[in-house]
Image: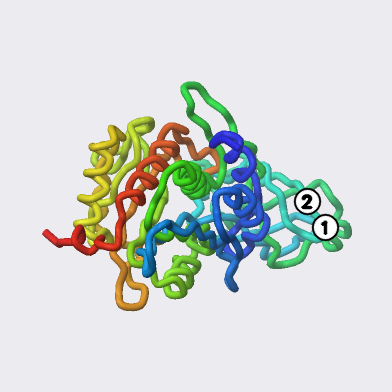
């Protein structure tokens, strides 16, 4: 399964934070051929292990990308069968009206998100984006039918298949961060062709969008020697400050900030330049926002890096990225892992 086919499989799947079971099974199935072990933990994180060829004790490297996505939760069934909802994770409410959705009731139920049209709005309403409390989901079903299929608390996501654009660019939902899980797949594929001494723990974490919960559990359980979070960063687009974005197609962005071990950043940068892998700087003044926040604080502390894939229109149903950046990220991760030996601590000198 190549990168594009993998994203076509996992991007449309439903995996709102806390309900990642379906997508976790697909990720595990795709990773399995390149792993020695693969199983979920108690919280639902996919945990794969690829053992190194070095003598024990071998360095333990943890790669983490989150499997969950933002979504909606049903809060009320209105008269007539219309559904009110709240958000789970940071959704841009401006993008919701007019979206097709699938509700995970006793069976999947399709619907559309509606709101009062401009023709029926007063002048004040016309000047503002609709609020969540003014929107509803219309399934076309009667109230009786809706109540048989859907309960308060059921989750919903935008119904969207991956769209292939030009020049190796794709768009779809949940590419934050299933693109990161694709990069881990590319890394594992590369590692199957080379010798490496370290043990590699590949994690598809859960509940990142609600506060790094899956990564917190995994990092405490595994207690790695080194960790790398693979996520997305903002891609270049009109109107976005250049210093806050990375260019699509120009390689992974390497995080620089308080959650990134400075020597680990230098190590990754050196590997990229030695192997001819394009990379971009990603200044991160705050440690919050990715699983790297949780990884660095596990047990007595873990040297952690952040490698990000440039992505446009984050937290919408048309997140857009370049497949080449995913492949280059996987190559960089594998090339880095191949250089980690039992003497890895000599590289971790803080400057």
Q: In this view, does 51 lie to the left or right of 258?
A: right
* Helix, strand or loop at mark 1: helix
Residue depicted at x 56% and y 43%: 173
Up/down of 14 relative to 55, above or below: above
Q: Residue 129: in sight, yes or no?
A: no
On residue 68, which mark appears? Answer: none
Q: In which quarter of the image is residue 309?
A: top left
Alpha carbon distance from label 1 to label 2: 9 Å
* Viewer-nearest residue: 204 or 343: 343
Q: Is residue 228 left or right of residue 218?
A: left
Residue 190 pos. (x, y %): 45, 42
Marks 2 and 1: in contact by CB < 8 Å?
yes
Q: Quadrant of the C terminus?
A: bottom left
Q: Is residue 315 left or right of residue 264?
A: right
State the count of labels.
2
* Viewer-nearest residue: 177 or 74: 177
Residue 320 pos. (x, y %): 48, 36
Neighbor class of circle 2 (other Cα within 10 Å; few <14, some 14-19, many 20+) is some
Q: In which quarter of the image is the N terminus?
A: top right
Residue hosting label 2: 109
Residue hosting label 1: 146
* Viewer-nearest residue: 258 or 346: 346
């Amino acid at each position: 399964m190549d990168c594009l086919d993998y994203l076509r499989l996992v991007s449309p799947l439903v995996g709102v934070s806390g309900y990642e079971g379906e997508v976790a099974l697909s990720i595990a199935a795709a990773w399995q051929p390149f792993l020695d072990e693969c199983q979920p933990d108690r919280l639902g994180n996919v945990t794969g292990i690829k053992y190194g060829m070095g003598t024990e004790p071998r360095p333990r490297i943890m790669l983490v990308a989150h499997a969950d996505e933002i979504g909606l939760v049903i809060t009320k069934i209105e008269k007539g069968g219309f559904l009110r909802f709240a958000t789970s994770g940071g959704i841009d409410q401006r993008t919701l009206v007019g979206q097709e959705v699938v509700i995970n009731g006793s069976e999947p139920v399709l619907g559309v998100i509606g709101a009062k049209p401009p023709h029926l709005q007063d002048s004040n309403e016309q000047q503002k984006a609709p609020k969540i409390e003014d929107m509803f989901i219309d399934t076309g079903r009667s109230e009786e039918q809706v109540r048989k299929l859907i309960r308060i608390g059921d989750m919903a996501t935008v119904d969207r298949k991956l769209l292939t654009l030009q020049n190796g660019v794709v768009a779809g939902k949940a590419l934050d961060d299933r693109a990161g899980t694709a990069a881990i797949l590319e890394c594992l594929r590369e590692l199957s062709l080379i010798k490496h001494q370290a043990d590699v723990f590949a994690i598809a974490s859960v509940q990142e969008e609600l506060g790094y919960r899956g990564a917190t559990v995994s990092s405490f359980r595994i207690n790695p020697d080194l960790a790398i979070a693979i996520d997305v960063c903002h891609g270049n687009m009109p109107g976005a400050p250049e210093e806050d974005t990375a260019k699509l197609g120009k390689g992974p962005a390497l995080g620089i900030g308080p959650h990134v071990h400075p020597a680990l950043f230098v190590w990754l940068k050196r590997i990229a330049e030695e192997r001819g892998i394009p990379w971009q700087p990603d200044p991160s003044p705050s440690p919050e926002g990715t699983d790297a926040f949780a990884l660095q604080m596990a047990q007595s502390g873990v040297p952690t890096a952040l490698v990000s894939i440039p992505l446009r229109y984050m937290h919408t149903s048309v997140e857009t990225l370049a497949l080449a950046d995913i492949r280059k990220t996987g190559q960089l991760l594998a090339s880095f892992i191949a250089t980690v030996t039992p003497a890895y601590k000599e590289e971790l000198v803080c400057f």
